[in-house]
Amino acid sequence: MRLSSSPSDSSGGEGQSGRLFGPLFADPGVERELSDVAMLGAMLEVESTLAHVQADLGIIPIDAAEAIANVCRAGAFDLGELGRQADASGNPVVPLVKAIGAQLPVDAAGWLHRGATSQDVLDTALMLTARRAVRVLRAHLRVGADVAFELSTAHRDSVMVARTLGQQAAPTTFGLKAAGWLVALDAAEAGLATADDALAVQFGGAVGNLGALGEPGLAVLAGLATALGLAEPTLPWHTDRGRVLGLAAALGSACAALGKIGLDVVLLAQSEVGEVSEGAAGGEGLAGGAGRGGSSAMPHKHNPVDAILVRSAAMRAPGLVSTLLLTSQQEHERGAGGWHGEWLPLRELLSVTGGAASRSRRMLAGMEVHTDRMRANLEATGGRLMAEHAAAALAPALGRAAAHDVVARCLARGGNLRDVLLADDDVRAHLEQQQLDGLLDPSRALAAVGPLVDRALAAHHLLPDAGS
Amino acid sequence: MRLSSSPSDSSGGEGQSGRLFGPLFADPGVERELSDVAMLGAMLEVESTLAHVQADLGIIPIDAAEAIANVCRAGAFDLGELGRQADASGNPVVPLVKAIGAQLPVDAAGWLHRGATSQDVLDTALMLTARRAVRVLRAHLRVGADVAFELSTAHRDSVMVARTLGQQAAPTTFGLKAAGWLVALDAAEAGLATADDALAVQFGGAVGNLGALGEPGLAVLAGLATALGLAEPTLPWHTDRGRVLGLAAALGSACAALGKIGLDVVLLAQSEVGEVSEGAAGGEGLAGGAGRGGSSAMPHKHNPVDAILVRSAAMRAPGLVSTLLLTSQQEHERGAGGWHGEWLPLRELLSVTGGAASRSRRMLAGMEVHTDRMRANLEATGGRLMAEHAAAALAPALGRAAAHDVVARCLARGGNLRDVLLADDDVRAHLEQQQLDGLLDPSRALAAVGPLVDRALAAHHLLPDAGS
Amino acid sequence: MRLSSSPSDSSGGEGQSGRLFGPLFADPGVERELSDVAMLGAMLEVESTLAHVQADLGIIPIDAAEAIANVCRAGAFDLGELGRQADASGNPVVPLVKAIGAQLPVDAAGWLHRGATSQDVLDTALMLTARRAVRVLRAHLRVGADVAFELSTAHRDSVMVARTLGQQAAPTTFGLKAAGWLVALDAAEAGLATADDALAVQFGGAVGNLGALGEPGLAVLAGLATALGLAEPTLPWHTDRGRVLGLAAALGSACAALGKIGLDVVLLAQSEVGEVSEGAAGGEGLAGGAGRGGSSAMPHKHNPVDAILVRSAAMRAPGLVSTLLLTSQQEHERGAGGWHGEWLPLRELLSVTGGAASRSRRMLAGMEVHTDRMRANLEATGGRLMAEHAAAALAPALGRAAAHDVVARCLARGGNLRDVLLADDDVRAHLEQQQLDGLLDPSRALAAVGPLVDRALAAHHLLPDAGS
Amino acid sequence: MRLSSSPSDSSGGEGQSGRLFGPLFADPGVERELSDVAMLGAMLEVESTLAHVQADLGIIPIDAAEAIANVCRAGAFDLGELGRQADASGNPVVPLVKAIGAQLPVDAAGWLHRGATSQDVLDTALMLTARRAVRVLRAHLRVGADVAFELSTAHRDSVMVARTLGQQAAPTTFGLKAAGWLVALDAAEAGLATADDALAVQFGGAVGNLGALGEPGLAVLAGLATALGLAEPTLPWHTDRGRVLGLAAALGSACAALGKIGLDVVLLAQSEVGEVSEGAAGGEGLAGGAGRGGSSAMPHKHNPVDAILVRSAAMRAPGLVSTLLLTSQQEHERGAGGWHGEWLPLRELLSVTGGAASRSRRMLAGMEVHTDRMRANLEATGGRLMAEHAAAALAPALGRAAAHDVVARCLARGGNLRDVLLADDDVRAHLEQQQLDGLLDPSRALAAVGPLVDRALAAHHLLPDAGS
């Protein structure tokens, strides 16, 4: 196709937004697949492929199919004009078919869009563009997972404090934290792969029963699926939006996984914690550039900008998924609003997930891990984080609740845990100093951490695309 | 400002979307206020006004303020480049301040953005553009209400059937239905007026406590509010997003009111009901154009396209409002994601409400009301809709439940209600034929309808902008 | 367990709600699995199984495990008291462990809850109760699908009108409509089966790294999974809520599928359409009872109550799923609010889906199909629904757009389609009367409908549980 | 009313939930107003008041009204049975009217529920119970605001560090932070007061046009509003749910304000920050009890349990508000699902807001403020937080960007800010040591903080209920 432009195209307010804020939340690669140009291209691809499939099946003349394909490939189309004309019919396929037809010889024009309805073209084009966008963002997730794999491997034994409900709780390693991110990223990618596989061609004609083509319509449905590489559905799915919901759910889960990583990074990067920071140069992927994370007012600040933007993207997924669940309940053989209401939120959900995946990848790749601060934070509480182990050792003798109370009483006295425990009669009655030293050694709490990390690393290796 | 463009501006995927689908869901007037250009203009207006206010207060030199205002008015800015640079800091104000500064003489550059933080500029610019967009959409709501007023007046006595739970229930008038739309539109507009009035200037400096300016900062806050015509908040509201939520709620309520009208129109326009249809030419407002509502495949169809698009817009509000409720819970003195996550959903919510308001106005203005079909549908059930009145008349004698059962028994026999009632012994024992004829006269059920309509019309007349 | 009750139990407001509205939206079988009693039972089952697994592995004495299991099975627990005490710790496991411990001999009490954290017990119990609830609701979905299968089979050739955007569009069969419901129900059930299989045991100890047990903790994790029949996760998933989201998404999709059926039924049951009605007696499943669908005021009404309640349940899923997407983004090693915020919405989502599935089943089983009304509605428009076929036949000669216009021009003249077409010169120039009669025969539009139905029926037969 | 109980009442699963988790998220006072008993009581109050109003207007006999009021006051009702019977009609008013009628003498039974429809009774009862619940939760908000007022007063000059995007940014005071909470709580309460005032009586009869009563119906509408203390609407609002949305929005905003406070407290209570902690004993309001915040596994932990539960409640509001926006778009004269779908989410939203308000009040009342930790955290960075002031002082001479860069370069050298600035040639060229000492004095950054706090305190004093 060639894009032409109507004279009035620059006067309207539409299409003028997105340059100022868009780059903050989106990924250029994903956006490219979601652009108007890509959508128009996909719709033309559907019309062209439909003609070819029907010619192969003898439903329309081969010459007509060639002519249609030529116009779809090399014809001139005015995006702005198509958009404006869409207003009369409620979707851009009606004016697009008219625009193709106007560029066809009369004997070919009658064979265009044969047996199809607007929704066949639009849904199939949406699935094609969604798949292409999903594949770009899946690549970001895979690279992000690979980086998490490397972080987990490198820091398998980097001791840090684990935190529950905002409080320091017990020793763990940064390798295990990164392994948690890895497992979630792998699961998110797997979920998207499943949803991707389910994306199906749409072809049912005016009311979804192949009424205009009759039984040969079934062969067209199958042929179109094969030619476009999409799944063949049992029935046309004009008002059965399960596939769209499957994709939405996978995108929502991916955003949740990415948002959790962003949240952890924001918390670990707090001034008072300081255990990780975002690299000023950024990793590969989105262009990095020096000086990332600066403040307009405060020269001393280094903000975890990527983590913040990942979180902001992840915050948008719940609302978008809920919109798609709402719009999916559609009337009879074509939804009176629900179908139309689905287009932009689906695109937006792909876009925010793409941005979150892309930024997470950069954030992980450029992450600076401060193991010294990790160790310092762990040691700041004088061994109190091992209190659970002392309580557990006393429990068989005193009972669970009493042991817990004895240790809590010791902690309330303040000071180094070992010292206050050794000063307590109840403790000394059941534990010797040597025993206690063993119990309070942080490495004691870490015996299962390495093996857990290894499970996550091994599971990542087993993935089809691991190491890609 | 002059817009310049960097060479790479057309290569990226950003900003390329919106021309194909945008016109279906948006209103050009609202979009103009929400565009990148409008947002950039508003940010420059804030910087410029800030300088003027500070010069008036003697905080910065008057010459510096003039120089800043000149650059804000006539300087060159590259939207695409600002957007790309925003990625490093997480918002576009940082590169914008740099771009203004680069065009200022050195002795003025130091007085730019004095005591301000990025969020001061961005929030205030958001409020300015939101207000301007809201005023456009409020005008659409007001015109829509005026049209509903006219429909209600014209059809005050056009009898039709009322439907509950999808079932024909009792007689009513189309005037009352339109009065219901009117009351809801008036309430939606009033809610937006209240939210509009609450939109406030943002000015707090780096951490929201006017730290860089000290006490004179309070006068800057007040001066900025006055100069920009926004409310002056008690405190800077960097992480107190109640005002944003107030606006979101009013937009959500407006969408709900519009969505209900769209839903009613879709249902009334059903082939089997046929009581209203959308005018093919459309009303004023959005360009109408002949042939609206046609189908790509089916020449006999006339779809209620505006109602469908109104519904699709209204379906997006719940998710967008929920996103803003989520993002509004922000950390400490600046949200780590929530603030950034708010910008696009707020813009989107304004946009879909604008589109819904604009299309509703056109839909109402072009509406064709088929009073003949209304009467035919009312009469199709042989008077059965008056059954409630017969039961009520029997109730004092038989008790409520027994009266209900007697009438239901009669109805179960089929046929015209009057006939089956007259054939029933229990009925005849308590009601004479003449009484029954009075009871079953549909006009009997409509005695309060006119007065109710008049209440709605009178309430509309009392509004400040009525008849505008 | 035995339930005891504290004296103050009836004074509070808690737990007093649900009897008045609950039966409208819930399914008794699903509710039973979600009740407080079921949840308490599942938590006790986890503690008991944990002790047995640890005894088998030699981590705790066998006698202690026996004692713990005895208390879990036969001990006395006061639900109200547990709930009130939960307030101090933020979850009911802390007081439950205390309550079990208080009923244990001292030498067993120290071995209780060994190496576990509250979240291990609560998450695992949630998964157990969720699975049990899911299995009840899956059975409802399966029976519903079986009924849709029967409807589709019985009405494979019952001709009716298909409707798009609320307008009569073209002929189809009720068999295909029911086949669409069938395919969606089968997909919903399959999605729930996948989510069910993924439900995993939770066991990670205080910070999710098995710190208190060390490497033997891995064997406990595996043993617990086996004993409880839940999946074994790669890592403890305290703050990786992907599994919960997978379940939520499957429930949301099920609600969407059910909501679409409810919507279709409401529309088909409209007085002016009248093609289906809900059986007054209802089908099997929920108790039916005579007189369902009556109105308190209007004796003549027969409301599609089940369809309405299915829709109302389906309307709640989008918000609940979005809440779970929000709460799933959790801090560090335990979420500070997100974990707690998940419990009730997950329960609620299971409950509304259960209610929707149960009511849909009853609605489908009791559905009365009025094929006479279907045929009458189809014929009401004098053949105009076949206009697409005339246009398609003219297209090769006239071009697509011109053919569409010719037919639209004929339709505008009003009257029976065949007559107006035959009266048109352009039509007669290209089509003979005999050809036209063939084109306008509704059965021509139905050639692919039977085969499409058969595809859906065959796919249902291939399911593991088909016909169960 | 007297509550009777059917034999099967304890066998079902319904109504058995809420004791285990309910107390964690709810407030007993709010729950009492939302309970089944309260709802039943309100429905009876509506029926009784309706009869009285109609008797006063001469529409029904005074004796009948007395009899109806007697049964409503002293009759026996079985909640479980009403709930079960509701299933047949889709709402509990139908069986309730039947149950009242069954206890009335025959000559009174016919005058019951005169001209009313189920929705009149249910909506009005919902508004009554909602108002009563709102008033309890508004009292919690007011007390919470009063405590925030006291915290703000007491800590007007308690210096602490302000944090933006998770990073230490500049000095502020805890008084200003608490003043921010105060302003948000006051606004939340004011929003609820406005929504409360708008709650209106519902009375329209079967289809919302007073069809059964005719013009006297208008007087009934007005009389019912007066008698029940609810607003009188312009029209019956069966399918105009703006009032419900207004209440939902105010509840959502309140949750957002409370959630932000909870979030701040969780962050301030982090082990590494330690600036506030929750009192172990809790404040007044909900019963406190010693040992709040303990962990089942870790004796050393003190979790900010109330803040966590407040956050978890606030996380539920976005989804619930979105559900109500969805359900508010209702068909014709009675919604086919939307009305029914509104009841439980509205109740749930009231409940979670009540719980959040109640816990916030306790959290604020019991809050321990650690000013020593605040000062230590502020001083930990060696004056770097004052870097903005040095840059601002250099800006007039060097330009804004260059000044920012000079200071950033100094900061990069590490060490105490004053020392590195004094060692820099560019700095020394423009600033003398004495000037610099002035610039870097934290009190310099706090000049506006006291006056800002005073604005918030004064605004609170101006409220109608201040100090109550």
Image: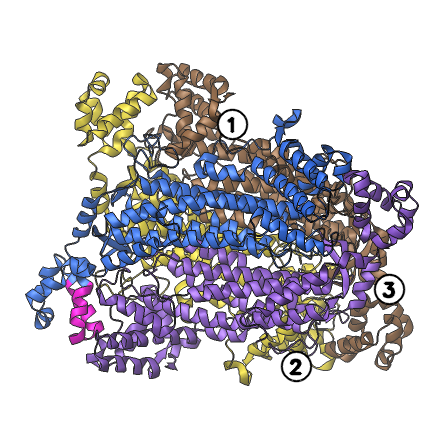
Chain colours: A yellow, B purple, C brown, D blue
Is there a contact, CB below 8 Å, between mark 1 and mark 2?
no
Mark 1 residue crowding within 10 angstroms, few (<14) / some (14–19) / many (20+) = few
* Image x and y of residue A390, in percent: 26, 26
* Image x and y of residue C46, in percent: 46, 27
Q: Is residue D58 above or below residue C19?
A: below
Q: Which residues are magenta?
A: D388-410
The C terminus of chain D lies in which quarter of the figure?
A: top left
Q: Is residue D370 above or below residue D257?
A: above
Report whether mark 3 lies on the same chain as mark 2. no
Q: Report the residue marked by disc 3.
A: C441
Query: Which SS class for mark 3?
Result: loop
Q: Which mark is residue C10?
A: 1
Chain of the residue where label 2 is placed in the rendered structure: A
Q: Report the residue marked by disc 2.
A: A103
C441 and D75: which one is in front?
D75
**Residue A39 appears left or right of D152:** right
Which residue is depicted at the point 29% across and 32% down?
A: A445
